Image: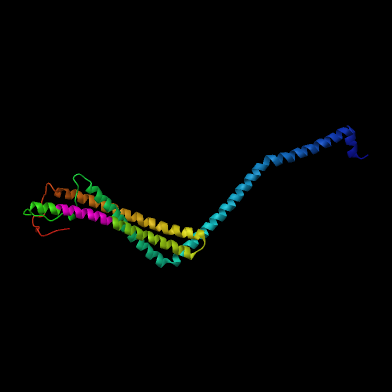
């Protein structure tokens, strides 16, 4: 009998078997403990790794698409710039007519209604009362027609700048079949047009302040059909403004 066997048998063979069996059982328990305790952790690590790889891949795709979108814009730069200028003019005329019409309607609805000086007829102290009232009524009619005309021009210029947007959209679609590149190219166009629109609104805000100050100055010339105040004593009775 060798030394190893003697040591096992010196206690009890059955005991030795039990010890061996316990050792195997502990090994299985350890394996099972690792499997269940760390499974969620490993799955989480794999998920984060996959997310990181996917995010990196997506960022790389977006960066490449942005570069190609910029190259697409540069390839049609002359047409792009020309379209941008046309759109700027169209949008400004749209905003001008839309907001000025709104302002004129506000003044028209005041009580008494305000008539800007440039619409008022030339009336002298010698003008016949009936002629005065006819001219004043005509001036108000002219004012209303002017408001109606601004509505027409507002819609006309809105249609124009939207047509420019549509034209650029078609040009981009014709230049690339890649949806991501087309998306970023359209975003470049949108960003530039939004900057132009913001500048147009800033210009209008200044113009509106000027018009309101001018209205305040012109109130001293205010009149109604019942109470006519002459503001131009040198005017001829034959001078009609509208």
In percent of width and height, residue 138 lies at 17, 54
In the depicted view, which residue is nearer to us: 148 or 185?
A: 148
In the depicted view, which residue is nearer to us: 134 or 78?
A: 134
Which contiguous range is marked in magenta?
136-150
Query: Chief secondary structure of the magenta span?
Result: helix
Q: Say if 233 sits above or below 42 in the image.
A: below
Q: For residue 203, say whether it is visible.
A: no
Which quarter of the figure is the N terminus placed in? top right
In percent of width and height, residue 55 lies at 56, 52
In percent of width and height, residue 128 lies at 7, 53
> Residue reaching furthest left?
126
User: How many dots with numbers?
Assistant: 0
Which quarter of the figure is the C terminus placed in? bottom left
Residue 56 horizontal side relative to residue 87, left or right? right
Q: Residue at x 44, y 61 (%)?
A: 169
Residue 63 horizontal side relative to residue 232, left or right? right
Please tell me in which quadrant of the rendered image residue 28 appears.
Answer: top right
Please tell me in which quadrant of the rendered image residue 6 appears.
Answer: top right
């Amino acid at each position: 009998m060798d030394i190893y066997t003697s040591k096992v048998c010196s206690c009890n063979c059955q005991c030795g078997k039990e010890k061996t069996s316990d050792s195997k059982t502990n090994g299985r328990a350890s394996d099972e403990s690792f499997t269940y305790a760390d499974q969620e952790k490993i799955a989480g690590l794999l998920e984060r790794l996959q997310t990181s790889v996917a995010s990196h891949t997506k960022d790389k795709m977006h960066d490449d698409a942005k570069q190609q979108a910029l190259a697409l814009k540069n390839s049609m730069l002359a047409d792009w710039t020309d379209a941008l200028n046309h759109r700027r003019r169209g949008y400004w005329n749209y905003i001008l007519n839309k907001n000025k019409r709104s302002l004129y309607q506000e003044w028209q609805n005041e009580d008494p209604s305000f008539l800007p000086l440039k619409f008022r007829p030339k009336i002298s102290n010698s003008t016949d009362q009936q002629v005065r009232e006819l001219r004043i009524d005509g001036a108000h009619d002219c004012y209303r027609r002017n408001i109606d005309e601004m509505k027409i021009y507002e819609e006309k210029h809105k249609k124009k700048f939207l047509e420019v947007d549509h034209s650029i959209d078609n040009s981009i679609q014709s230049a690339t079949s890649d949806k991501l590149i087309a998306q970023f190219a359209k975003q470049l166009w949108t960003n530039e047009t939004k900057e132009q629109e913001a500048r147009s609104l800033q210009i209008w805000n200044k113009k509106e302040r000027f018009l309101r100050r001018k209205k305040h100055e012109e109130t001293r010339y205010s009149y109604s059909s019942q109470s006519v105040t002459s503001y131009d004593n040198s005017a001829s009775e034959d001078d009609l403004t509208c």
